[in-house]
């Protein structure tokens, strides 16, 4: 967990179980928004996780579930 909190990009190398763990993924995107790319699909539609990722790095919105990519609030945040 400490590695993910310090450098979220390590999520890429985590097991599938860890990529599906909401707490782990949330910690990863807090430090590195682009870690959303490596999260399990079901977490890419978790609005809190996506919001956290987008606040960290707007480009990460491209890895969110389609319905969240179209969310007006998230799109505005991503554009900032």
Image (cartoon, grey):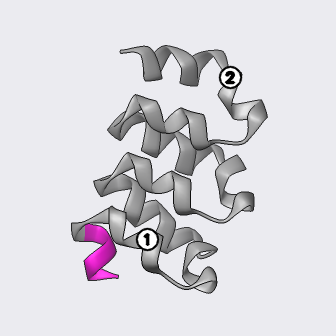
The residue lying at 68 percent from left, 22 percent from top is 71
Mark 1 and 2 residues: CB-CB less than 8 Å, in contact?
no
Count of labels shown? 2
The kind of secondary structure element at disc 1 is: helix
Q: Which numbered tag is attached to residue 71?
A: 2
| Residue holding disc 1 | 11
Q: Residues within 10 Å of mark 2 (few under 14, many from 20)?
A: few
Spatial CA span between label 1 and label 2: 25 Å
Residue farthest to the left, as pictured: 6
Q: Residues within 10 Å of mark 1 (few under 14, many from 20)?
A: many
Magenta stretch in the rendered image: 1-5
| Magenta stretch holds residue 33 | no
Whether residue 22 sits left or right of residue 11 in the image: it is right
User: Mostly what secondary structure, the magenta segment?
Assistant: helix
Q: Indicate the quadrant containing the N terminus: top left, top right, bottom left or bottom right.
A: bottom left
The residue lying at 51 percent from left, 53 percent from top is 36
Taking depth in this image into account, of 12 and 64 the one nearest to the observer is 12
x and y percentages locating residue 60 in the rendered image: 48, 39
The residue lying at 59 percent from left, 76 percent from top is 21
The kind of secondary structure element at disc 2 is: loop
x and y percentages locating residue 18 in the rendered image: 55, 81
x and y percentages locating residue 6 in the rendered image: 21, 69
């Amino acid at each position: 967990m400490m590695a993910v909190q310090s450098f979220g990009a390590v999520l890429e190398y985590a097991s599938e179980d860890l990529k599906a763990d909401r707490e782990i993924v949330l910690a990863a995107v807090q430090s590195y928004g682009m870690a959303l790319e490596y999260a399990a699909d079901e977490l890419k539609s978790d609005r809190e996780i996506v919001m956290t990722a987008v606040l960290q790095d707007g480009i990460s919105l491209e890895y969110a579930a389609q319905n969240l990519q179209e969310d007006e609030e998230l799109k505005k945040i991503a554009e900032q």
